[in-house]
Amino acid sequence: MSDDGSLFMLALGPAGGSALYWFLYRYYRNTDKSHDFEHETAVVAKPVTGSEAKVGDVKGTREKRISGDNVHEFRQRVQRIRDDTGRTTSDKGSG
């Protein structure tokens, strides 16, 4: 331990661990990119419009399922978003 090289290697471990912890913390927390909704978003309320016309009654449920559900064909509800190049958003990370 008398030469400076071994002292440098000894200090490299805790410094590297601290740097890795800081990097992972910043990567997963995105603290510098957070959005403060209450202060940065302008919400403009408008008066409620509509009428008092009664549309229908629901007095309990008699049917076990909702008409038009797709429980057994669940793949139909998956819609892939395509970008300008024609690739899906799930393809972007692989190429």
Image (tube, rainbow, N blue to C red):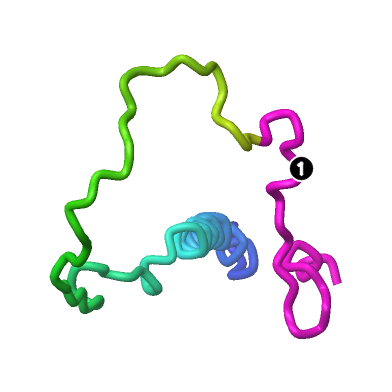
Quarter holding residue 66: top right
Residue type pointed to by label 1: Arg
- Position of residue 72 relative to residue 4, above or below, is above
Quarter occupied by the N terminus: bottom right
- Secondary structure beneath dot 1 equals helix
Quarter holding residue 58: top left
- Identify residue for label 1: 75
Q: Residue furthest bottom?
A: 84
- Position of residue 8 relative to residue 52, above or below, is below
Please tell me whether residue 93 belongs to the stretch shown in magenta. Answer: yes
At 51% across and 63% down in the image, what residue appears?
27
Q: Which residues are magenta?
A: 70-95
Q: Residue furthest front?
A: 53
At 74% across and 29% down in the image, what residue appears?
72
> Local crowd at mark 1 within 10 Å, few (<14), some, or many (≥20)?
few
Q: Would you say 79 lies left or right of 4 here?
A: right
Quarter occupied by the C terminus: bottom right
Between 52 and 29, the residue placed more toward the observer is 52
Please tell me whether residue 39 belongs to the stretch shown in magenta. Answer: no
Question: x and y percent of residue 78 in the render?
Answer: 71, 50
SS majority, magenta: loop
At 24% across and 77% down in the image, what residue appears?
40
Between 62 and 92, the residue placed more toward the observer is 62
Between 44 and 8, the residue placed more toward the observer is 44
Question: x and y percent of residue 57 in the render?
Answer: 31, 31
